[in-house]
Each structure stands twice: as structure tokens, then as C-alpha cells.
Amino acid sequence: MMVCNYCHINTFTIMKFNLIAFTFFISLISLKAQDYINQKYDREKLIMDRLTLGCSNLDPLDSLVRIGNIFNFNDDTLEVLGVDTFFKGETTLKFEYYTNCTQISNKEGKFTAFFNGYLLYDRYGNYEELTMLKEPIFGHRGHLGVNRSLILPYPGKDSTYILLTPWKHVEDPAFEALNATAIAGIVFRELNTGKLKILDFYPEIITGNFGIFGAMSAVRHANGRDWWIVAPQRLDNMVHTFLFSKEGFSNKSTQKTKYVTGETSNNPEFSPDGQWYTRTHVKVLSQWHNISTIQFYKFSRCSGIFEDQIEFEMDYEDTSNVIQVIFEKNSRYFYITSVLSLYQGDIQSEDIKASLIKVGKSRPLMWDEHMLIGAGFLAPDDKIYIFDGRPNFYGSIINNPSERGLACDFQYEYRAFPACTSVNFGNLPNFNLGPLDGSPCDTLGLDNPLAVEKDTKKHIEYNIYPNPGNILIHTDYNFERKDLKMKLLDFRGKVIMNTYAISLKTGIDISDIAPGVYFVIIEGMPVKKMIKI
């Protein structure tokens, strides 16, 4: 009889390799699930006034003119630095800010790119002139508008971004304006040096008629990685949507909505949970009377379809205009800025307009000395920062935006900044919105790992069988939801079976599946189990 001296070692080695491979596979899944959340694309913002030289220093003895602020939230609290300075008497600026401004930090939270509608800047003030967007604009850049463009991280491509911007403008004589007829995309990469390199150009992702203001908004797809882009038609009730993924652009459609998009929807945006798309509209009746309208659209991150649609007019206050709707982090309470007043509403109320509470106001008789209540943003520290829109050193803040009524703690002109501020902080979506738990459109096959981690602390252990040799896979757990999906993956991550999890109660036949080690995932529940068949 021949004794195999290497069999035990080889078997042990193979078992060890399989364990390492499985651990790597589990790590890969965890990495895959978390790769698009907890990034810091919004941690540093450049905020400056488009009139630049219209501000003098707070300190008249300062030898520098400060025309920009970096708002840094990397330590979860706000740090402000005066930047983009030049010596008095010089005219060279590091950044030029017109009215169309979008920007992004990298995933580490370092200010990365700034687009003014014409030039794409890196963090050092070096710029690429986007000559591919050059067009006859009649000697001015008034077509640039406010919040027209987007910069998004390219799904699945590290240090790579896409700039989406309207272009191919035509004149509208009736409104004395220029409106875009296409949306273009410029792909660029951040190099190790911090400089930017243009990689690709998409001249016409979609065509249409896009407004001077608030042309686009973005929200994460239900898989937590890809992006839905929403671009309403100007002065129309048609809205373009398309999906941006690792493979490029797809799912292009035009939806007919209930309400018309206005001309001056400066800051349309999504709620942090991605369920509501909101925009404003101002209709000028006369020099002394405007009508301000608020619109809410229920949005499916799974299908990209608008569902419930709500519109109401603000009560007439004076000739001041509504500016923006800003949601707090839980996507329940929202704030309406309207130049002279700040209102809070409850999106869960049966009568949303009736839920409005005035929680703040400006000082209307002293406009030249004090700030107005203009555009703002929900910051990574969960506070809402509000700015004027004119050359102004001040900012206001909502300290506790998730509290109802005056408990939100609005502080008017709470702080003076080193340089002037305006409304140019960019069209920033919620970069950290994760996968939608249990969604049939979670195309990456995994749920939000943060939710799973939280749920496992309060749920029982979910036992999934079989033992080796059984022909059924089953569980003794009592499912409350019948729509939950179960996936069976092999060691390479290939989906072997995709069915309803409730079938586990009676048992799922696995007799046709080759013996081996498999991974069970039940969507919407903290279930990730290894089984051996």
C-alpha cells in the first residue's frame, strides 16, 4: 500500500485556499456594497461672489483682496478659509466665477474641480478651456445661468468624473434669452498631481429645450452607484430623464408631467433620500406683484418615473421671490427661502401648504446693509447654510433643521466670512445616498450595508439550510413580506438562482445545482449566508 505523504498537506492547503478565497469574496462583496457611500465629494466647497471686485475687505488694512471662501467640512464641523486672493492693484484672479458654477471634491474630501460654464479649473487655479463647447454667444456669457451644470463621479472608475452641461444655444426673442438645445458630457480624470485631464466628449447626450436656470439635477439609482439625471424642458411640462452608469448613458425617456417648468427655477434638487424632486417658479405679473410657486414630484429611484405631483402658490407677501426648497437630512421637513422670509414645511402632512411655518425673516428696510434669505445647502454637518446672492460677507444658518418649528434654531446673519459670498456653491446632489433596501432595481445585487449592520443588532439569527446531501434549501424564519427576493451566488459572484425568499418556507429544489459552496442573499433583510451543497 502506497502512503501519500503530501495528501494531508495538499488537502489542508486547498481548504486554506478556499477559506482565503471565500473571505476575499465576502470582502469583495462588502467593498462592492460600500464603494459608493461614505465618500467626501461635498466636503470642500468654493464659495465666492460673481461680482468679485464689488467687495472690499472686512479689514481695510489687509494687503490682500479676498474674493473666495473654502468651506471645509472634512472634520464634520465647518472651517472657513479665505482663498482666491490677489494683492491690491492687481487684477489676476485664480478663479473666474460667472453665474454657472458647479464643483466637486474627490472622494478623500479635497477640492478637485470647478466649472464656470466656460473654463474647468483644478484646485490650484489651473484651467482647461473647453473649446469643444465653444459657440457664438453674441459677445456675452449671459447664457451661463445658475445651477445649470453637474459634475458627478464616474460610476466604477476611480478618480474619474463627468461634467454635464447644456450647450448649443439659440436665441429666444420673446424672452430675450438664450436657451440650450442639447446636453453635453465631458469626462475628465484627476491626476496624482491634482491636475485635470480631459478624456472624452459626448456632444449630444440628449436634445431638447433647456432653461436658463436650474437645467439639471441628479440622484442615485436604487443600486446606490449609478445616477439618474433629470432635465426639464423650458416653459413646458415635459421632463427628460436618463441613466448614467459604468456603461455610459441609457434609459433615456421624456415624461409628461402635470405642471409646467418655469423660467427661474434656480435651484431644483432632490430630497436626501431621493424620493422627492422639487423646484420653484416665479411668475411676474407686474413690477409690484409676483406669484411664487412650489412644486414637488415623487420620484422612483428604481424606474426613474415621476409619480405623485404637488403644486401650490405661496401666499403673496410682497414683490420678493421664492428662491429654493431645501430638505433636512431625514427628508421630512423642508425649508423655503423667499428673500425676505424663511418657511418650514412637512412633506408628510396631508396638506403640505397648510404645514408651512415662518421660522425666520430678514431685515427688509436695510437691504444695503443686511443680507437677504437666498439659496442654501444642507451640509455634511447636517446644518443648512443660507446665502444672499449679492456681494455680502454674511451667512445665515439653520442649526437643527430636523426639529419642528422655531426649534430648528434659525440664526440670521450668524457669521461674517473672510470674503464675499453668493449662490455659486454648485449643483451638489447627495453623493452618499446608498442602495435602496429590498428594491428589485438594486442591480448590484446587494442592499445598503449600513442598514444591514444596524438591523443585525435587533433581529434574530436567520438559519438557512441544507446540510450536505440535502436537495432542498429552506429556512424556519417566518417571512412577513412576500415580495422579498432571494439570490444564490457562486464563488465567483455569478447569480445561480433568483427567486422569491418566501419559497424558502416550503423549500427550493437545488438538485440541479452542482455541489459546492454558495452564498445566499435575501434583499431587504440582514441575510448573507454561506451554504454548502
Image: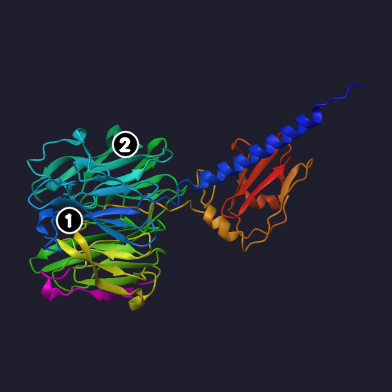
Q: Is residue 81 visible?
A: yes
Kindly identify the residue that appears in the image at 52 percent across and 55 percent down.
450
Residue positioned 8% across, 47% down in the render: 173
- Where residue 348 sits in the image (x, y, percent)? 40, 69
Of residue 334 and residue 41, the one placed in the foreground of this image is 41
Q: Say whether residue 214 is left or right of residue 72.
A: left
- In the drawing, what numbered circle is on residue 188? 2
The residue pinned by badge 1 equals 66
User: Which quarter of the figure has residue 410?
Assistant: bottom left
Q: Is residue 368 above or below residue 462?
A: below
- Quadrant of the rendered structure where residue 403 is? bottom left
Q: Earlier in the sequence, mark 2 or mark 1?
A: 1
Question: Relative to 2, is 244 above or below?
Answer: below
Q: Is residue 499 left or right of residue 214?
A: right
Residues under labels 2 and 1: Cα distance? 29 Å
Dot 1 amino acid type: Arg
Q: Secondary structure at mark 2?
A: strand
Give the percent coordinates (x, y) of residue 332.
40, 67
Which region is colored magenta?
Answer: 350-371
Please tell me whether residue 4 belongs to the stretch shown in magenta: no
